[in-house]
Amino acid sequence: MSAEQTLSIIKPDGLQKNLIGEIYGRFEKAGLEIVAARMMHLTKEQAEGFYAVHKERPFYNDLVSYMTSGPVVVQVLQGEDAINNNREIMGATNPDDADLGTIRKDFAASIEENVVHGSDGPDTAAQEIAFFFGDDGICPRTR
Ligand code: IDP
Ligand code: MG
């Protein structure tokens, strides 16, 4: 499989726990390159738009409150099988179900406050990357 890109977010609890470097280290050790990055405090409208797919879920309003409770760090990860690779590094949505050594097993407090987001497939990856970085926000490695 050729190099792929995926959208990753370190969520507000991840910043509160001061885990940016720890999480970036895990990405880099797994061979993923960070090719775009920004820190931002999502507005309610941005969080609602990003998670629109979950609009009908009972946890939607809480999810929007959580995602706007503090700043986040958003990045594009690039590498072989990046989407699945990142999902493996993250672990299952519910930390109780996550494998040992994953970010969520090691750091998540609950199924909601689970530290990281990662795209779940090629279509959502493309949409989510465009949502945060538009057409020209990526910085390809030139060396
Ligand atoms: P994912 O982040 O592992 O892809 P999704 O099912 O896409 O999981 O859910 C998006 C986010 O919504 C989760 O990461 C988590 O923060 C929150 N969430 C998912 N399921 C629940 C739930 O049952 N209760 C509360 N929050 C949830
Ligand atoms: Mg998801």
Image (cartoon, rainbow, N blue to C red):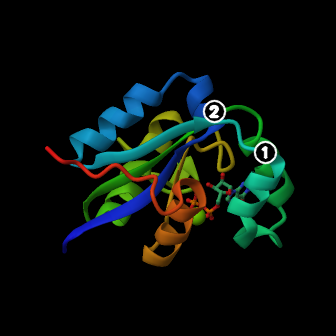
Q: Position of residue 141 (x, y in %)?
A: 22, 48
> According to the image, label 2 marks what residue?
13
Rounded to the nearest angstrom, the CA distance separating label 1 from label 2 is 16 Å
Picture quarter with the N terminus:
bottom left
> According to the image, label 1 marks what residue?
43
Residue 143: name its quadrant: top left
Nearer to us in this view, 122 or 129: 129
- 116 lies left or right of 36: right
- Secondary structure at numbered mark 2: helix
Indicate yes or no: mark 2 CB to ligand 1 under 8 Å: no
- 64 lies left or right of 131: right
Identify the residue at horizontal 66%, vertical 42% (top origin): 113
Say which amino acid is labelled 1: Thr
- 58 lies left or right of 113: right
Indicate yes or no: mark 1 CB to ligand 1 under 8 Å: no
Does residue 24 lie above or below 30 as drawn? Answer: above
Q: Which mark is residue 106?
A: none
Say which amino acid is labelled 2: Asp
